[in-house]
Structure formats: structure tokens, C-alpha cells
Image (tube, helix red, strand yellow):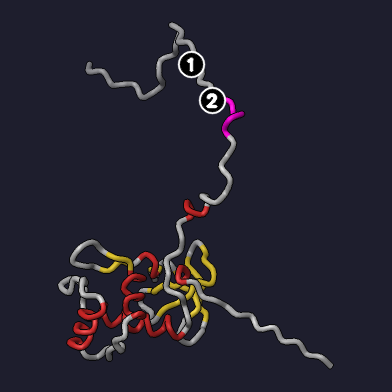
Amino acid sequence: MVVSCTSQILIMEYSRIVAVTGLPGLFEIVSSKTDGALVRSLEDKTTKFVSSRIHNLSHLESIEVYTVNDNVNLAEVLNAMKESKEPLPDGKDNKLLRAYFEKVYPNLDFERVYSSDLKKMVKWLEVLKKNEVEIKLSEPAAESSENSEPLETENTPEPVTVEAEKTSEEKPKRGRKKKTEE
């Protein structure tokens, strides 16, 4: 008797990871509907429907972080944290959090990036590492068409525009009649 077991390795894409308002942690979008989305928690792997009437979904790809110069994408800060040799701080001590981010990403605007935001970034990085999510932005769709063959335009006829002749018998525009003062 031969038993074959095929294990399906699911690689989570960074572009499918979202934060949901009112719910702790990060989620992977399983499918979306017009009135919400089906999401799977990265922490306990439970799947639930999240109504768009009650919750907002924020893709991690679309989150930007304030810096002293231009805003940067969250992925850039998370990658700097990941590549840093500094150990992740305990999320309970705000001074340690700030000192950590001053070393790892010194350009953060600490007047506009609050301690709660720093805590989220540390927690999110831990969850992403645990789930082996590669932190990278997805390529825009326009770039993928660069490798495809260009459209053939040599034999394409030029568009023709035709103007209709105006006649003196044009009908007046229909509309509301103006009231005349009597």
C-alpha cells in the first residue's frame, strides 16, 4: 500500500496582507466581496468574514510612514528593521522603542509617528517573520507589459473624424420654458 502525501506550501504575498480596524493583528485576504472580505488571521489561522460596513481594510502596501523628508512606504521601514542587527525592543517601554527606531530608521518624524505606531510596526514585523512573508512591494501592472511585444501599428488605419453639416433647420433645444413676467 502506497500512501502519497502532497503538502501544499502556501506562500503569503505581502500585497495580500491587511490590517483591519477594530481587530488586533494582521490578516491575509482570502477573497473579497462587494460588502466585505474573507480574511485569515496570521496569528491563529482562523478565517472570518469582515464587513466593509463596520471595518476598514488597510493593505500594508498602501501604508506610509512619516519621515523628516518625504513619506516612505511601510515596507521600507520593516525591511530596515529586519536587516538591522538590533534586537526588537519590548513593546511596553516607549523610550526603548524610540531609541530602537532612532538607530534603525533615524529619519522617522517622531513628532508625527506615535509610540502606538512604533509598537504596531514591531508587532507586525514579528508576525510577518513568523509567517515567513517576504516584505516587498508588488510590481505595478504597467511594468509587466514592458516585456510583452509591442502592438503592431504600421498597418493600422488612421481614425477618421466626420463632422455633420449644420442645417438652418435645427430644432430648438428642449428644456423648461422660462416664466415670463406678466
Q: Residue at x 36, y 80 (%)?
A: 82
- Position of 36 with respect to 103 (left or right) is right
Crowding near the residue tagged with mark 1, few <14, some 14–19, many ≥20 C-alpha atoms within 10 Å? few
- Position of 129 with respect to 179 (left or right) is right
The answer to if 154 sits in the magenta stretch is yes
Q: What residue type is labelled 2?
A: Pro
Q: Between 46 and 178, which is closer to the camera in this rendering?
A: 46
Q: Which mark is residue 175?
A: none
Q: In which quarter of the image is the N terminus?
A: bottom right
Which residue sits furthest bottom? Answer: 1
Which residue sits furthest top? Answer: 168
- Position of 10 with respect to 16 (left or right) is right
The answer to if 101 sits in the magenta stretch is no
Q: Between 61 and 134, which is closer to the camera in this rendering?
A: 134
Q: Which mark is residue 159?
A: 2
User: In the rendering, at what x and y percent does residue 14 appear?
Assistant: 45, 71
Q: In which quarter of the image is the C terminus?
A: top left
Looking at the image, is 69 positioned above or below residue 90?
above
Type of secondary structure dominating the magenta stretch: loop
**Total numbered circles:** 2
Mark 2 or 1, which is nearer the eye? Answer: 2
Q: Between 38 and 135, which is closer to the camera in this rendering?
A: 135
Q: What stretch is highlighted in magenta?
A: 153-157
User: In the rendering, at what x and y percent does residue 160 appear?
Assistant: 53, 21
For disc 1, the marked residue is: 163
Could you say whether the residue bearing mark 2 is in a helix, strand or loop?
loop
Which residue sits furthest left? Answer: 111
